[in-house]
Image: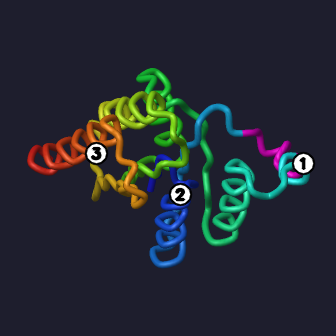
Amino acid sequence: FLLSNGLSSLGADFSQQLAREANHRLVLVEATDFPARELWDEWVSNDSGAGLITAKIKRLRELEELAEVFLLQAELSDETQARALSKQVKERFGSLDGVVSIFDDDSTDEHALLTDKVQGLVALDEALRDEDLACRLVVSRTRTDGSLSAVDSAVRFFVDTFASDSARNG
């Protein structure tokens, strides 16, 4: 299974469930600014422990105890990087069983929400168009603090429409 945003708090729940219950190999996609593996110990020791990257490193290490994890770094909103990612996965595993695209707001940057999430969903879908996937899941967490902006609403509407259209058209 390939999981975009699979190390976010919501994404980690899905990743752990797939690793524990179904014994799947996981391909986790993180942004290109995620630190290289050889820097993780230093990163964690220099952080207060509350940082987003530190949390993701800890989640990844926990997942690696449960399953085979292949971490790839790509900006999925870039079609070229999405296609390169698809090629790397095919070379390593031959095929994918499924894709889980997770929309979990770790950021309040509305521009990132639009570009990284929405464009990433479309670019990844296009890059994997020829894959015979058993499932395609789009997961979105709605804010509970009442601060749903116009951009949040538009993104949620797009994701719902995209998922519905994908289900109808296979």
Q: Amino acid at mark 3?
A: Arg
Residue sticking out furthest to the front: 146
The answer to whether residue 161 is visible is yes
* Secondary element at tag 2: strand
- Labels 1 & 3 near each other (Cβ < 8 A): no
| Mark 2 surroundings: few (<14), some (14-19) or many (≥20) residues within 10 A | many
Is 163 placed above or below 114 here?
below
Q: Residue at x 69, y 67 (%)?
A: 62
From the viewer's perspective, is residue 59 above or below residue 112?
below
146 left or right, relative to 35: left
- Mark with earlier residue (1, 3): 1
Is residue 24 positioned above or below 105 on the image? below
- As shown in the figure, which amino acid type bears the numbered disc 2? Leu
Residue identified by numbered label 1: 46
Q: Dot 1 lies on which element?
A: helix
Task: Name the front one of labels 1 and 2.
Answer: 1
* Magenta segment: 35-42
Residue position marked by numbered label 3 in the rendering: 156
- Decide which of tag 3 and tag 2 comes sooner along the chain: 2
Write down the quadrant of residue 68 in the picture: bottom right
Q: Amino acid at mark 1?
A: Asn
Q: Which mark is residue 26?
A: 2
Sooner in the amino-acid sequence: mark 1 or mark 2: 2
Name the secondary structure under disc 3: helix
- Between 50 and 138, the residue placed more toward the observer is 50
Label placed on residue 6? none
Note whether residue 128 is visible: no
